[in-house]
Amino acid sequence: MSLPSLLLVGCGKMGGALWQGWLKQGLAPSIILDRRCDAPPAPHRVVRTAGEIPGDFKPDIIILAVKPTGMEEALASLRPFLDGAIVISMLAARTVESLRAACGEATSRIVRAMPNTPAAIGKGVTGVCSSDLDDAQRALCTSLLSAVGDVAWVDNEEQLEALTPISGCGPAYVFLLAELLEKEALRVGLPPETARLIARGTVSGAGALLAASDEESETLRKNVTSPNGVTAKALEVLMAPDAWPATMSEAIDNAMKRAREMAS
């Protein structure tokens, strides 16, 4: 069964990742609005301006994947297509209230969502909140977003803002770990090809084990850690009070602070 007809506004890194995931699932004829992206396969099409969208095109869902500063301009240009559509915003720190104001008099249903980039391979996690949807519309959004990974509905925007620096930003933290492991492998004398292989394989393999296991992440960590062994000595450094426990909290707080600044 195909996913519903979409209008994807913005096809950068996140929008492009989601689009590729949706294409793999099967997608009713849809349109991308983006000035730079390549043409998608038929029957889908790309337009460079809202004025090029056919007047008889009635998308079930409009996805906003533009930069937050472009929201008002984007929604103003889409007024003819907003009535009756579900508008899913993937814009960090833009509230439902501001989105509804930008939609004007249109009878749109507003949804805020925060996906992450593993959506490109169907392994994303998307946090979602909305008070505008009935059960059928919520199920439609879940179907769309679950095509690219797990979907976590939260009760309100405060919870969505709390989720953003965890899952939305989280892949960057994991990629940084792989980057640092590769650099350390080089530092201790391994050749570049080996350093890259073991760093990436270790991170992706541990993630796959975590996904496949019913055990808590803490338990999996302890399973690798023999008392007074090699791993234990490394973790003594990483788990010191002023190391990862403190710096991760500081990182999350910094991200949340920046999200509030962007919303103001």
Image (tube, rainbow, N blue to C red):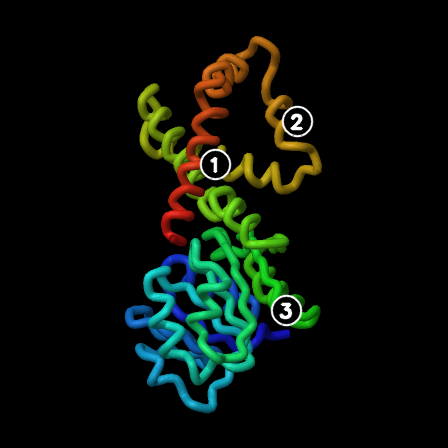
Most foreground residue, 129 or 220:
129
Q: Residue at x 50, y 20 (%)?
A: 239
Q: Amino acid at mark 2?
A: Thr
The residue that mark 2 highlights is: 219
Is residue 163 left or right of 263 when viewed as pictured? right
Residue at left 37%, top 76%? 76
Sort mark 3 into few (<14), some (14-19) or many (20+) by Cα contacts within 10 Å: some
Please identify the quadrant where the N terminus is shown: bottom right
Q: Residue at 45% x, 52% y: name it.
A: 117
Q: Residues within 10 Å of mark 1 (few under 14, many from 20)?
A: few
Between marks 3 and 1 in the image, the one whose residue lies nearer the viewer: 3
Residue picked out by circle 3: 133
Judged from the image, the secondary structure of the residue bearing numbered disc 2 is: helix
**SS at mark 3 in the image:** loop
Toward the viewer: 25 or 65? 65
- Nearer to the camera, 50 or 25: 50
Label 1 sits on residue: 201
Marked residue nearer the N-terminal end (3 or 2): 3
Residue count near mark 2 (Cα–Cα under 10 Å), binned few <14, some 14–19, many ≥20: few
Q: Is residue 222 above or below residue 214?
A: above
Give the residue at x 70% y 37%: 214
